[in-house]
Image: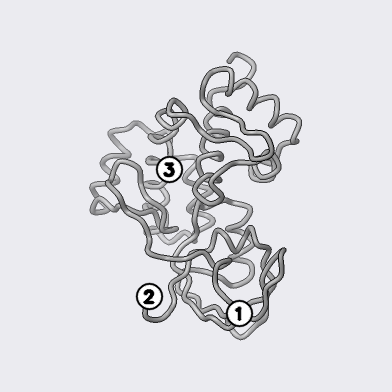
Amino acid sequence: MREVRRVAVEDYLSTIYRLEEVFGVARTVDISAELGVKPATVTKVLRKLSEQGYVTWSRFRGFKLTEAGLRAVRPLIRNHRICEHFLHVLGFNLLEAHVYAHYMEHLPQVIIDGIHRFLGSPKLCPHGNPIPGEGVAELRARPLKDLGVGEEATVVGFRGELRTYLAEALERGLTIGSRVKVLAKTKGGLMVEVGGREQYLSMKVAATIMTVTPGS
């Protein structure tokens, strides 16, 4: 794929992977928002990725990675999440760790593996998402969007660590350990109370925020 750089292809594949973690499918509009590129550009690149066997497309639903796409992207996701963990230990916040991990994920594998051992071989990244290759490790949690009105919960992770939605959640005071109460729900989003303040969250943002309720 001469007209699309390797790193750009990896960005698309990893974005689809993360969107699938949250929504089960990746839609053009969400890929466009996450990568900051025009929908027409997304469509062009995805058409080429489909031709190469990395993604499949379902009408009215969106894109999903094929087995070939998963094989290509899992090592990158693994490296990225190990680097996120390392950066978070160094004191970077969840958004910074995600952003700066992009600059580290292509380090020589021997360095990434050494970092992982140094960290004690974690199975989850600091956002609570599985590090591929470390066995089944899943947070026993529910998306905030699934909570009913009046339910209270504690934030324990951010599915997919999608930059757009993670930034919005953090701006509204939602971070790991935050207590949140659902005040109202509409088709488009939730009104919640966090840190003594009422905040509105779109349903897409609420889908990425993983929570546990008392006694769960």
Instruction: State the residue at coordinates (70%, 29%).
Output: 43
> Could you say where residue 2 lies in the image, as x and y percent from the top left?
60, 13
Q: Which is in the foreground here, disc 2 or disc 3?
A: 2
Residue contact between numbered discs 1 and 3, judged by CB atoms under 8 Å = no
Image quadrant holding the N terminus, namely top right
Count the marks: 3
Q: Is residue 66 above or below residue 124?
A: above
Q: Which sits in the foreground, 170 or 56?
A: 56
Q: Amino acid at mark 2?
A: Ser
Of label 2 and label 1, which has the lower sequence position? Answer: 1
Q: Amino acid at mark 3?
A: His
Counting other residues with Cα less than 10 Å from the Cα at mark 2, is it few (<14), some (14-19), or many (20 or more)?
few
Q: Amino acid at mark 1?
A: Val
SS at badge 1:
loop
- Numbered mark located on residue 216 in the image: 2
Residue that extends furthest to the top in the rendered view of this protein: 2
- Numbered mark located on residue 149 in the image: 1
Counting other residues with Cα less than 10 Å from the Cα at mark 1, is it few (<14), some (14-19), or many (20 or more)?
some
How far, Cα to Cα, is label 2 from label 1?
17 Å
> Could you say where residue 52 lies in the image, as x and y percent from the top left?
54, 18
Mark 3, residue position: 80
